[in-house]
């Protein structure tokens, strides 16, 4: 089955300290957001992209889509204060499609094979996310002192894409909005409906470009992937 994807790109990139939206930073002479969009542009199972952008950057994004021949963006939607609001703005503009993915504009290294495994899983379960096992030993700390060590075998780091049956994600947003809960990912909203969310194991290349040193890691991943 095919899918639609919402790509939130309306952040300010404050932690990247680039003085502009980090998604315009170039890797190998191509903006980060174009690397991300191209993964979906070439995926035959992707039927359409909803790109969520800041009002003031509408023109810049429109220009980039044209220059790089990105044809699957059906809708350019205005973002909100937090990522949570940006994704919701994208979601309410979608037709009642069966499966919708949400994928961070700042994760350009997602692979098609992982997307397809995720979509297949979400078709069966209604909700699934890409995640990787945590590599570090994680401590719970209070006022500078360790309170305990969390069993690592039960810890996974959530990534995107996250995939849902559209009506489930709409219900999850409705409950969150009614209760004024703001999530940092979509799965956390669905968890609050007490519905099961499946994990699809991804890979460690799928980093979110967040702080300046991530750009060095990105160069290395590009080399490894021959991009
Ligand atoms: N995002 C969005 N709308 C917001 C905030 C974030 O669409 N109000 C998007 C970002 O553009 C990014 C993704 O959500 O593609 C993940 O967010 P994050 O990595 O936190 O990016 P920024 O919010 O831009 O960065 P920062 O938090 O450092 O300012
Ligand atoms: Mg942010």
Image (tube, rainbow, N blue to C red):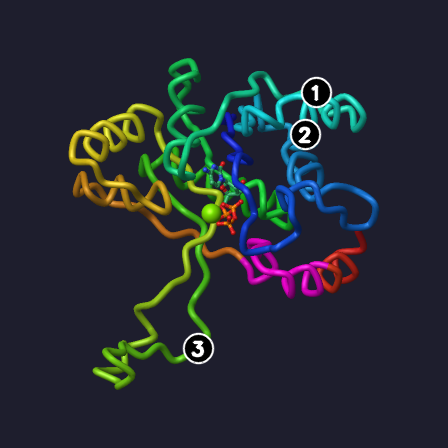
Q: On residue 71, which mark appears?
A: 1
- Front position in the image: 6 or 119: 6
Locate residue 190, reporting x and y percent: 26, 40
Query: Front-most of 218 and 128?
Result: 218
Q: Position of residue 47 (x, y in %)?
A: 57, 22
Q: State yes or no: discs 1 and 2 in contact (Cβ < 8 Å).
A: yes
Q: Which residues are magenta?
A: 203-218
Sort mark 1 into few (<14), some (14-19) or many (20+) by Cα contacts within 10 Å: few
Secondary structure of residue under mark 2: helix
Answer above or below: position of 139 versus 207: below
Direction right: furthest residue: 29
Disc 2: which residue: 41
Residue drawn at point x = 65 percent, y = 40 percent: 36
Q: Which residue is mark 3?
A: 136
Q: Is residue 148 left or right of residue 134?
A: left
For marks 1 and 2 on the same chain, the one whose residue lies earlier in the sequence: 2
Q: Name the side, left or right, on which 210 lies relative to 159.
A: right
Residue furthest to the front: 19
Question: Is there CB contact under 8 Å for labels 3 and 2?
Answer: no
Label 3 – label 1 distance at C-alpha: 41 Å
């Amino acid at each position: 089955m095919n899918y639609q994807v919402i790509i939130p790109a309306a952040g300010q990139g404050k932690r990247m300290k680039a003085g502009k939206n980090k998604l315009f930073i170039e890797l190998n002479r191509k903006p980060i957001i174009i690397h991300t969009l191209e993964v979906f542009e070439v995926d035959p199972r992707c039927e359409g992209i909803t790109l969520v952008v800041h009002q003031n950057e509408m023109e810049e994004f429109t220009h980039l889509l044209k220059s790089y021949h990105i044809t699957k963006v059906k809708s350019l939607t205005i973002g909100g204060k937090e990522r949570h609001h940006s994704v919701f703005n994208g979601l309410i503009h979608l037709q009642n499609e069966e499966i919708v993915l949400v994928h961070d504009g700042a994760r350009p290294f997602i692979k098609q094979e992982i997307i397809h495994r995720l979509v297949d899983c979400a078709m069966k379960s209604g909700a699934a996310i890409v995640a990787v096992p945590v590599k570090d030993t994680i401590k719970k700390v209070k006022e500078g002192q360790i309170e305990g060590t969390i069993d690592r075998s039960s810890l996974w780091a959530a990534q995107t894409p996250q995939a849902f049956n559209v009506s489930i994600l709409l219900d999850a947003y409705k409950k969150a909005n009614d209760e004024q809960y703001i999530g940092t990912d979509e799965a956390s909203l669905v968890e609050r409906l007490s519905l099961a969310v499946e994990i699809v194991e991804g890979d460690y290349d799928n980093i979110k470009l967040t702080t300046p040193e991530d750009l060095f890691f990105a160069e290395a991943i590009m080399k490894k992937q021959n991009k």
